[in-house]
Amino acid sequence: MDTNDKNEMSPAERRHRAAARKRRQEEMKRRKCRRALLFVVMILVVAVIAGGIIVAVSKFTGGGSGVKISAQGSTYVIAIDPGHGGRDTGMSSAAIEEKEADLNICAKLKIMLESQGYQVVMTREDDSYLSKEERVAAVNASGADLLVSVHCNYSEDDSSQSGVHVNYANDDKESKSLAENIDAALVKETGAKDQGSNSCDFSIVNDTDMPAVLVEAGYLSNESEGSELADDVYENSVAKGIAKGVLATLNR
């Protein structure tokens, strides 16, 4: 028999070898796909872990989102404006007048911010009356880096309305960031309904020279919330929420 005949494969053998070669190629493809998938999974795991670390650090340091506010001098000067006062009582609930609730919250807020090493100036520290123009002039003269004005809300049409709301100066990114951070912290500290934040036309935030917000701490027209705003513990929670929002915004 010719030796070449010995080396020739039958059609069945050729088909068998071709099928085996195809199986090997398909197995190699599957291995490559598994390796690629494993690589992608590893990247995602690393990204999730890194993201968790970033979030944890952010929470530990006070977090906050948006634009930061820098101090003009060696330390921050924060202006606090308790709404109303004197003959201007503001609105009221069965338990408290707005001017009193505003001052109570701001007095607590002052202590909290000063305990963190910040300089605080108040437009009023007693039951005195100040016009809008006098408030704006006093804040601008203080050289403050930011302003927080505190009021209470009221709805004449719907006594079920409740929640915290923060107004900020028109077209000002720093004020908007401050408002958003205070709003988030207030909701967390008080458990109140989130009424959000938006720009406004109030002179105390638009005619002053620094990032400014006006906080509506709750609805005096709501029986439950009106009572809470007269409670020392709840007022402390409001002040704490505002303080945390301020700290989250400062470029420390």
Image (cartoon, helix red, strand yellow):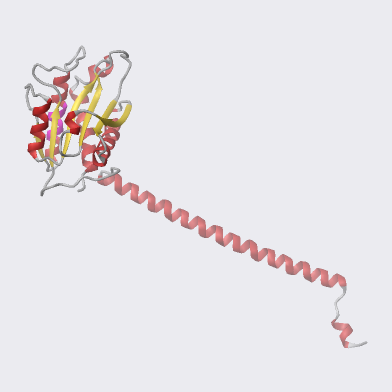
Figure quadrant of the N terminus: bottom right
Residue extending farthest to the right is 1
Name above or below for residue 150 compared with residue 17: above
- Which residue is most to the bottom? 2
- In this orientation, which residue lies closer to the viewer: 98 or 48? 98
On the rendered structure, is 103 left or right of 156?
left
Range of the magenta residues?
105-111
As drawn, 159 above or below 117: above
Q: In the figure, 109 relative to 158: above or below?
A: below
Residue 80 location in percent, x, y?
Answer: 14, 33
Res 128 quadrant in image: top left
By secondary structure, the bulk of the magenta-drawn segment is best described as helix
The answer to whether residue 105 is above or below residue 64 is: above
**How far across and how far down the image is residue 10, in percent?**
87, 74
Question: Which residue corresponds to the image point at 18% horizontal and 47% vertical from the top-left?
Answer: 70
Task: Name the residue: 30% across, 49% down.
Answer: 57
At horizontal 55% and vertical 57% (from top left) the residue drawn is: 37
| Residue 141 relative to residue 93: left or right | left
Queried whether the magenta region covers residue 107, the answer comes back as yes
